[in-house]
């Protein structure tokens, strides 16, 4: 398990805890966001796959991402955003965008199918 976080100059904080999940062949990530004024956004940059978002679950053929939270006002969206891994080269990749206007915890469980 590893845990890290920060507090910005406006007193907004973000703490992330990452734990290996051997039972599900994956990871459990818990993000705690607090003190922000308007909204907090988490971006999960994804590998290129045929992703399907259904409620709080995002699936591809070999990966499943489950979101759970104590936040009542949360919005998940599958978008494409630019990525530039090399100078003068840009491509669009799938991104899971999680937006909330409330403080709280967001638990992301990532499972890899064998």
Image (cartoon, rainbow, N blue to C red):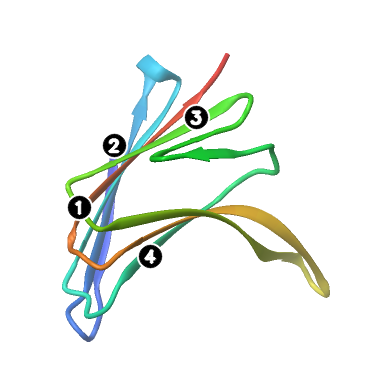
* Residues at marks 1 and 4, CA–CA distance in whole angstroms: 13 Å
Residue 87, above or below 76: below
Instruction: Name the residue carrying label 4.
Output: 41
> Residue at 26% across / 61% down in the picture?
5
**Quick one: SS at disc 4?**
strand
> Residue at 55% across / 29% down in the picture?
63
* Residues at marks 2 and 1, CA–CA distance in whole angstroms: 24 Å
> Residue at 36% across / 15% down in the picture?
23
Q: Earlier in the sequence, mark 4 or mark 2?
A: 2
What is the number of the mark on residue 71?
1
**66 or 85, nearer to the observer:** 66
Q: Earlier in the sequence, mark 2 or mark 1?
A: 2
Quadrant holding the N terminus:
top left
* Residues at marks 1 and 3, CA–CA distance in whole angstroms: 21 Å
Foreground tag (4 vs 2): 4
Q: Residue 58: x and y, percent?
A: 50, 37
Instruction: Name the residue carrying label 3.
Output: 64
What is the number of the mark on residue 1?
2
Do tag 1 and tag 3 residues touch (Cβ < 8 Å)? no
Q: Residue 57: x and y, percent?
A: 43, 36
What is the number of the mark on residue 39?
none
């Amino acid at each position: 398990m590893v845990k890290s976080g920060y507090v910005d100059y406006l007193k907004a904080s973000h703490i992330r805890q990452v734990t290996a999940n051997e039972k599900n062949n994956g990871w459990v990530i818990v993000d705690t966001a607090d003190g922000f004024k308007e909204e907090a956004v988490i971006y999960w940059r994804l590998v290129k796959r045929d992703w399907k978002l259904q409620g709080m679950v995002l699936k591809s053929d070999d990966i499943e991402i489950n979101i759970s939270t104590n936040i009542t006002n949360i919005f998940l969206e599958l978008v494409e955003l630019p990525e530039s891994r090399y100078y003068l080269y840009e491509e669009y990749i799938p991104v899971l965008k999680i937006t909330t206007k409330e403080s709280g915890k967001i638990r992301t469980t990532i499972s890899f199918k064998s």
